[in-house]
Amino acid sequence: MMQEKPKLIYVYDALCGWCYGFSAVMHSLFEKYHHQFDFEVISGGMVLGDRQGPISESAELIKSHYPKVQETSGAIFGDAFLAVLNEGSQFQSSEKPAIALCVFKSFEPHKVVLFAHDIQIAKFIDGIDLNIDDNYLPLISNYNISEKEFLEKLKSEEYKQNAYYDFALARQLQVSGYPAAFIQTSERNFYMITKGYSDLATMELRVENVLKETAKA
């Protein structure tokens, strides 16, 4: 039985270049379908534990991949980000941006796709260090959110635990690479609509196919 409103679940990581390439696609899906779906964004936790470290440790890998992301998606990696990549010292960790996403959801859960997009623009165009709490304040300026409350929550253990719950949920959904997206039509019924990057036309087709299938049920 179909639930009242299906949910479109986007599993991403703030540090994932292919998610940045896919970000505009998700933004467009949100604009088109936000009346038909509840949208959820889950952080996958791509860079945690011993994967954390200065960006220099993954710089060669990033340099080998980002031109392909640009070519495939049209998303541009900014000069400020490339300067950070070449300088090499910025610390890479998925933890703080995942906490920030959970904090944002406590204020504006229905706009979480937009905020995930904002985080990735800050990272991959402006080269912003996502480990620094105050760097999120310009990102929330477009939303009706108290800076003081946002920073307090960003420092709290509760929202750190929420972020790690999201990481566990991504594993439960058997996501091993990003981006990934699902449509959930009931408690146990999930349709995977992308595993890796897909363009907007492909995503719209898959969403429409799920809507047609569930309408028959």
Image (spheres, rainbow, N blue to C red):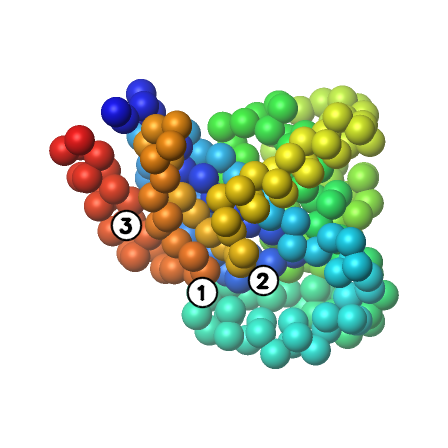
Q: Position of residue 188 (x, y in %)?
A: 38, 32
Query: Of the residues under marks 2 and 1, which one precedes in the sequence?
Result: 2
On screen, 40 above or below 85?
Answer: above
Q: Which label sits on residue 73? A: 1
* Mark 1 or 3: the one toward you: 3
Give the image quarter of residue 7: top left
Q: Position of residue 109 (x, y in %)?
A: 54, 27
Query: Of the residues under marks 3 and 2, which one precedes in the sequence?
Result: 2
* Mark 3 or 2: the one toward you: 3
Amino acid, disc 3 = Arg
Give the image quarter of residue 30: top left
Q: Position of residue 136 (x, y in %)?
A: 73, 40
How packed mark 1 is, by other alpha carbons closer than 10 Å (few <14, some 14-19, many 20 or more), is many
Q: Residue at x 72, y 32 (%)?
A: 161
Horizontal side of 207 relative to 114 (left or right) equals left
Q: Which label sits on residue 206? A: 3
Q: Position of residue 165 (x, y in %)?
A: 64, 35
Residue bearing mark 2: 17
Q: Residue at x 18, y 39 (%)?
A: 212
Q: Secondary structure under badge 3?
A: helix
Query: Of the residues under marks 1 and 3, which one precedes in the sequence?
Result: 1
Horizontal side of 3 relative to 114 (left or right) equals left
Q: Residue at x 53, y 42 (%)?
A: 172
| Residue closest to the eye, 75 or 216 | 216
How packed mark 3 is, by other alpha carbons closer than 10 Å (few <14, some 14-19, many 20 or more), is some
> From where the camera sits, is residue 153 visible?
yes
Q: Are marks 1 and 3 in contact (CB under 8 Å)?
A: no
Give the image quarter of residue 49: bottom right
